[in-house]
């Protein structure tokens, strides 16, 4: 699933090309996503000017004068730019044209979404319950220490809890914990203030580096221009089970946590 870096890279690419442009056509080729694409979306968007695109967690918020288009890439989706009228493939579900340029939602597994809200996006049920942004000013060691008191869940699970902090999935939780030297199964509530500070800094550093590298392309992800990311080449633990740790040479271990593969170095992470 695209995580915060991939969604942010997509946002920046789309916003640079489309902000200030007017919708000239909307084509729904297959409405069967996580939630059905509204059948009246072409009527709603036609003639509206896109003010800009924001990100909230893994959601993209397309701001228009009369409301907000909420999009999510799901497990394998991407939003790509193409020439309006260019050939499309079977996995492209929705196309929104801005004159000669079109934005296409490509989603092979159909776990993504594209919904309209006429109210405040922050009040929408999909957005209202989200936690804080890990790249925002509020996220630091002190906040993480307070937020994890009394939590018995593994720290990796806590990092991936979108009601606590948004956008951190399996890949970046694993990489951040490695950089901080913390084992994924450590109970969140047992982390000291010092270790929370180290982990918060590692999360921000990892996400920032991943964004600069264009994200991680593990399967289907490409950015708005169709270019894959390259941060996967820098992964220290994720997807490297049995390979030597880049720091100490110990083989990377993989275990199961909340039905997901979890990677760590048994020597560097305590």
Image: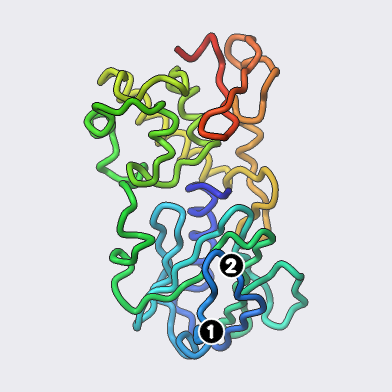
Query: Residue 185 vs residue 110: left or right?
Result: left
Q: Residue at x 50, y 83 (%)?
A: 41
Q: In x, y percent, where is residue 198?
A: 35, 23
Q: In x, y percent, where is residue 203?
A: 41, 33
What kind of element bears circle 1? loop
What kind of element bears circle 2? loop
Q: In x, y percent, where is residue 206?
A: 47, 34
Quadrant where the image shows the C terminus: top left
Res 39 label: 1
Q: In x, y percent, where is residue 49?
A: 43, 83
Q: Residue at x 57, y 34 (%)?
A: 260
Q: Are marks 2 and 1 in contact (CB under 8 Å)?
A: no
> CA gap, disc 2 to disc 1?
12 Å
Task: Examine the rendered structure and indicate whether residue 195 appears above or below residue 9.
Answer: above
**Image-quadrant location for residue 83:** bottom right
Query: Residue 160 vs residue 238: left or right?
Result: left
To which residue does mark 2 refer?
33
Mark 2 burial class by Cα count in 10 Å: few <14, some 14-19, many 20+? some
Query: Residue 204 vs residue 23: left or right?
Result: left
Q: Earlier in the sequence, mark 2 or mark 1?
A: 2
Instruction: Please say which color scheme the image uses.
Output: rainbow
């Amino acid at each position: 699933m695209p995580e915060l870096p991939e969604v942010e890279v997509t946002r920046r690419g789309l916003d640079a090309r489309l902000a200030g442009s007017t919708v000239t056509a909307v084509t729904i080729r297959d409405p069967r996503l996580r939630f059905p694409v509204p059948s009246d979306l072409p009527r709603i968007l036609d003639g509206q000017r896109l003010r800009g695109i924001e990100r909230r967690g893994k959601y993209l918020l397309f701001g228009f004068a009369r409301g907000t288009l909420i999009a999510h890439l799901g497990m394998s989706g991407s939003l790509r730019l193409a020439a309006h009228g260019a050939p499309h493939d079977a996995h492209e579900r929705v196309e929104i044209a801005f004159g000669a340029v079109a934005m296409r939602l490509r989603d092979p597994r159909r776990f993504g979404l594209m919904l309209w809200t006429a109210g405040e996006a922050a009040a929408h049920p999909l957005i209202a319950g989200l936690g804080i942004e890990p790249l925002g000013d509020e996220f630091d060691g002190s906040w993480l220490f307070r937020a994890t008191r009394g939590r018995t869940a593994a720290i990796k699970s806590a990092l991936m809890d979108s009601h606590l902090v948004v956008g951190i999935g399996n890949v970046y939780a694993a990489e951040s914990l490695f950089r901080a030297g913390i084992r994924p199964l450590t109970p969140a509530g047992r982390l000291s203030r010092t270790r929370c500070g180290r982990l918060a800094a590692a999360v921000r550093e990892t996400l920032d580096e991943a964004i600069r590298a264009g994200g991680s392309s593990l399967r289907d992800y490409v950015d708005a221009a169709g270019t894959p990311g390259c941060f996967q080449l820098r992964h220290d633990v994720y997807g490297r089970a049995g390979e030597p740790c880049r720091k100490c040479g110990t083989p990377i271990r993989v275990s199961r946590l909340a039905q997901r593969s979890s990677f760590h170095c048994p020597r560097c992470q305590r």
